[in-house]
Each structure stands twice: as structure tokens, then as C-alpha cells.
């Protein structure tokens, strides 16, 4: 599988490189040239970008899966969520991860949180839903940073089996 990291807006290249190296077990990771933030992309009455608008940015990027990495706050008003760490096109090929909430405890913690969120969103593109029964599984829904910090960066066994089935189809 070719996984493209698509920086959108201002994203530290060294952070992108570190995220990319952590995601290498999923396949070949490519880092695309930065793209500007989408225009007219704010949620109603909000200064946060609607996460779904990043699909327009990702559709023009190459790769089996594309993860936009951005530094702006995201919302998902369609689901009633005022702040989200990431968003994915379920069963699609794109996702977005926001770094805006991950800083403050150093670059290592930022990268750790970004990788967990990227794997979670990648899982959605591979057909996985939220695994609310297992708070250690990366597919557990993160309502707050403490949820992200507590969970693993790995899929639990049932989620891994499902993800590997989809990944095997992408490799053929």
C-alpha cells in the first residue's frame, strides 16, 4: 500500500518525517508537497475547519490512502462534534489528522498522539469502526487527550485481523 502524508497549511517537516517513519509498517509512506488550507471550510458559527472539507484536498493526492496532516482545529458538525482530533472517509481513501491539540508536552508526545490518531483514522479507511469495548485498542474513540494517551498505537486482535484483510487486498 502507498500511504501519502499530505501536509495542509503550516506543518513542521521534521514532525511529518517522524510520523511517516512510524507509519512505515503499513506500506510505502510518501510525503507530498504542502497544500494550502481549503477555503470556505469553517463550520457554522465556528472558527474550526470542517474536517470533511479536507477530502477535497486529499482527492488530488496520489496514493492508496492519503492522510492530510494539518495544524488547524477541526470540527465534525455533521456528527455534532465541535472538536475532533481527526476524521476519515469511512471505507474511503482519505483521512485528516489535526496536530493543533497535541503540542504542549514536547515533540515526542505530539508525534505519539499524531501517530495514534493517524492509525485510528487509517483504520476507518480500512473499514473499521470504533472499538468502544477495548480502551487499549487504537480504534477506541478519543473524546479527550487522556483517551489518546491511554490507548495503544496498535489494533487489538479482531481489529488487526480485519485491517490486515483489507491491506492484503491493497497489496495485490
Image (cartoon, rainbow, N blue to C red):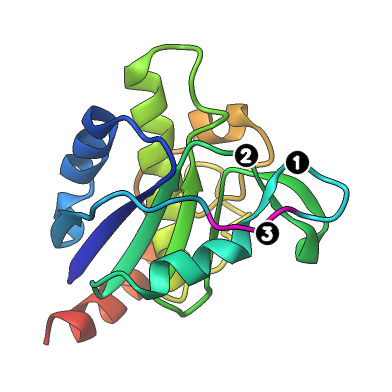
Main SS of residues in magenta: loop
In this figure, which residue is indicated by the disc labeled 1?
Answer: 47
In this figure, which residue is indicated by the disc labeled 3?
Answer: 40
How far apart, in angstroms, are the residues tagged by discs 1 and 2?
8 Å
Residue 132 sits in quarter:
bottom right
Q: Is residue 77 above or below residue 117?
A: below
How far apart, in angstroms, are the residues tagged by discs 3 and 1?
11 Å
Between residue 138 and residue 64, name the one nearer to us. Answer: 64
In the visual, does 154 lie left or right of 17? Answer: right
Q: Position of residue 140 (x, y in %)?
A: 56, 50
In the visual, does 45 lie left or right of 24? Answer: right
Secondary structure of the residue carrying tag 1 is loop
Between residue 151 and residue 59, name the one nearer to us. Answer: 59
Indicate which label's residue lies in the foreground, 3 or 2.
3
Residue 156 visible in image: no
Q: Which residue lies furthest to the top in this view?
A: 105
How far apart, in angstroms, are the residues tagged by discs 3 and 2?
14 Å
CB atoms of marks 3 and 2 within 8 Å: no
Magenta stretch in the rendered image = 38-42
In this figure, which residue is indicated by the disc labeled 2?
Answer: 73
CB atoms of marks 3 and 1 within 8 Å: no
Q: Position of residue 114 (x, y in %)?
A: 41, 38
**Residue at (14, 62) in percent of width and height:** 27
Disc 3: CA contacts within 10 A as few (<14), some (14-19) or many (>=20) = few
Indicate which label's residue lies in the foreground, 1 or 2.
1
Amino acid at each position: 500500500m502507498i500511504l501519502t502524508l499530505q501536509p495542509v497549511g503550516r506543518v513542521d517537516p521534521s514532525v511529518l518525517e517522524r510520523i511517516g517513519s512510524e507509519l512505515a509498517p503499513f506500506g510505502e509512506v510518501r510525503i507530498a508537497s504542502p497544500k494550502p488550507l481549503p477555503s470556505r471550510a469553517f463550520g457554522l458559527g465556528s472558527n474550526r475547519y470542517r474536517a470533511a472539507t479536507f477530502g477535497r484536498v486529499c482527492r488530488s493526492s496520489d496514493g492508496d490512502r492519503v492522510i492530510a496532516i494539518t495544524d488547524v482545529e477541526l470540527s465534525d458538525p455533521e456528527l455534532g462534534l465541535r472538536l475532533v482530533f481527526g476524521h476519515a472517509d469511512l471505507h474511503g481513501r482519505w483521512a485528516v489528522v489535526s496536530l493543533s491539540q497535541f503540542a504542549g508536552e514536547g515533540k515526542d508526545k505530539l508525534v505519539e498522539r499524531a501517530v495514534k490518531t493517524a492509525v485510528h483514522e487509517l483504520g476507518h479507511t480500512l473499514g473499521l469502526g470504533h472499538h468502544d469495548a477495548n480502551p487499549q485498542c487504537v480504534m477506541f474513540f478519543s473524546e479527550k487527550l487522556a483517551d489518546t494517551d491511554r490507548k495503544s498505537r496498535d489494533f487489538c486482535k479482531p481489529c488487526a485481523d480485519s485491517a490486515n484483510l483489507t491491506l492484503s487486498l491493497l497489496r495485490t
